[in-house]
Each structure stands twice: as C-alpha cells, then as structure tokens.
Amino acid sequence: MKSGLPVVVSLLLVALLATGPRWLSPYHVSLLMTVFMYVALAGSWNLFSGMTGYVSLGHGLFFGLGAYSFAVATSILKLPPVLGLALGVMVPGLIAALIGLVLINARIRVAYFAVVMLGLNEITKTIVANVKAIGSSYGLTPPGVSSKYLGYYVLLGIAAAVTAFAYGVQHSRFGFGLRAILADEVAAETIGIHTVGHKLAMFVASAVFIGMTGAMVSWNWSYVDPYMAFDLTVSFDMLVMAMFGGFGTVAGPVLGAVVMSLVKEALSSSWPQFQPIIFGVMVIVLILWCPGGIIQAFEMMRGWLRPRARGAAA
C-alpha cells in the first residue's frame, strides 16, 4: 500500500487540476499552463540527462522543432491542428534518432555531448532564421486554439504523461539498466547492458515529449519565430529546474519546475530588474548546499528529524 501511495496521490492531484478552469481565475489558469509546460520540459530533459548522466545544454532544439513543425503544418501546408501536433511529435523524434545514432554510437564524451547539443540548437536557429519559405526571422502565425481551455488540458496531459512515463521506466528492468549506466557505463556494458540502445531510446523519448510540448505552446501562442522557439533560455530552464528539484528522480523535476516557475513569476512581477540575480543565487545556494536538489534536502530533513522523534518517543 505504501509503495502505491505516490501513484494514488498523483492521480488525485491530476483530477483536482483538471477541474481548475471551473474555479480558477484566467490569470491562475494561465499561470498553471506555464507550470505544466515547465514540468513537461524539465521531466523530459530528465528522462535522458538525469537518467543517463549525459547532460544536454541544447534540448531546446526539440522544443523549437516541435513548435516550428506545428506552425509550418498549419500556417503553410494548411493541415488541421491535430496533424500539426502529430508532426510536432514525429519531426523532433526523427531528428533525435538521427542525432543519437551519430553522437551516442560515436560514444562521444559527456562534456563534449553537452557542447555539441548546444551548437546544434544555435545552428538550427540560424538556419531557420534565414529560410524565407518558413518566415525567416519574422516567424509564422499558426491558427490559435479553438477551445478556451484546450491548451490547459493538453499541457496538463503532457506533464502527467511525462511523469508517469518516468515512473514506469524507473520501476522497470530497463530503468535498472539506466541506473547502471549512470553509475558506471563501462561496468554496465560488462554485465551485458546494451548501453547504446538504452541511451538512444531515452534520447528519442525525451525529444518526443519536448517536441509535443513545443507544438502545443506554438498553437497556444499563435505565433512563433526562431528566437523564441530556439531560445537557449528554454534549454537552461529545463536543466536548472530538473537539477533544482532532484537530478535523476521522478518527483524532482516536478518539484523543481513548480517551485522555480512560481518563483520566477513572483520575482518578475515584483522585482523584474533583479529577477535573474535572485533566481541565480537561489539555484547556486541550493546546489552548493544540496547537489541532489529539493529531494536531497527532504531526505536530509527526514534523517535529522528521525532521531529526534525516536528520542521523544523513548
């Protein structure tokens, strides 16, 4: 029963959030959509980088590809939005498979992997900004969301799906292989784990969820340009939120995304000029104090309180 408690609590929370548009103000609905977006992005980044140790600084590439795939499909090819969302999933997934086959099969070192992904994001941004057929630097204007709260429910569904997928992977035999890769990739290969296959599968899964999020955000924004879609801030936000919550865990990216997106909103409305400084200091302090993020902080507090509780009971 205890092991199933997090699942029950999560399902109840998703059910409660699903009723949000009925009793929340438009501002709070919009704020929750931003939170859902960051939960999906941080959780998706964590699927690959958090579970394998291969930190990516350019996962925003797949967000931009998803956003642009939807925009091109709906505003240029005049396809229905549903097909635009499908392309927003397939294109990032296909590109991720091609990138993964090159980088992961080449067994490129972790530090170089991060830099290469960063470069790919910037190269793609430059290419898209110079192709007139897809709007160049002016961007595209896909049709807006037809239903008032469709974006809310889709983003909630993506965030829930990413979290459920991470939970399923972590509690599977496949997840055991990923933990072995994270601990020692050479030793994992020695005991028969197909390390390349594990990493490639998670790389593609991560890209698919991020692309899906980008496509939905593009539909919700009704506008996309290269500098928004491939903004490096998107990549860094995923990384920072996942690490702030707890690198390689299921709940960590969710907690990190919720806390940091709310803090960003509060700071940007109260002290916009100091928001990047305060935000950065918070991250540095937590990471220096607890490299494992909020999850590790909770574990430290539990370890500190347990002896006191036993002493009081005695």
Image: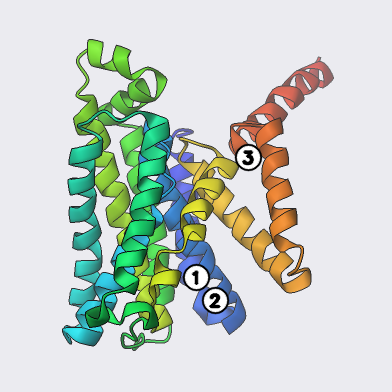
Within 10 angstroms of label 1, few (less than 14), some, or many (20 or more) residues? many
Residue in the picture at 31% in, 37% down: 169
Q: 228 left or right of 255?
A: left
Of the 4 image quadrants, the one containing the C terminus is top right
Quarter holding residue 302: top right
Q: Are marks 1 and 3 in contact (CB under 8 Å)?
A: no
Is the residue under label 1 in contact with that under label 2 (CB below 8 Å)?
A: yes
The residue that label 2 is drawn on is 29
Residue ID for mark 1: 33
> Does 51 sit above or below residue 14?
above
Q: Quadrant of residue 112?
A: top left
The front one of 57 and 184 is: 57
Image coordinates for residue 104, horizontal then vertical, percent: 25, 34
Colour convention of the picture: rainbow
Whether residues under marks 3 and 2 lie with C-beta atoms below 8 angstroms apart, the answer is no
Q: Is residue 54 above or below residue 184?
A: below
Q: Nearer the viewer, residue 117 or 209?
A: 117
Which of the two residues, 157 or 19, is positioned nearer the viewer here? 157
Q: Identify which amino acid the numbered label 3 is placed on.
A: Ile
Residue 203, numbered label: none
User: Residue drawn at (56%, 47%), measured in percent from left and top?
Assistant: 240
**Res 294 label:** 3
Three-letter residue code for mark 1: Met
Question: Is residue 4 among the parts visible in the rendering?
Answer: yes
Structural distance between the alpha carbons of marks 2 and 1: 6 Å
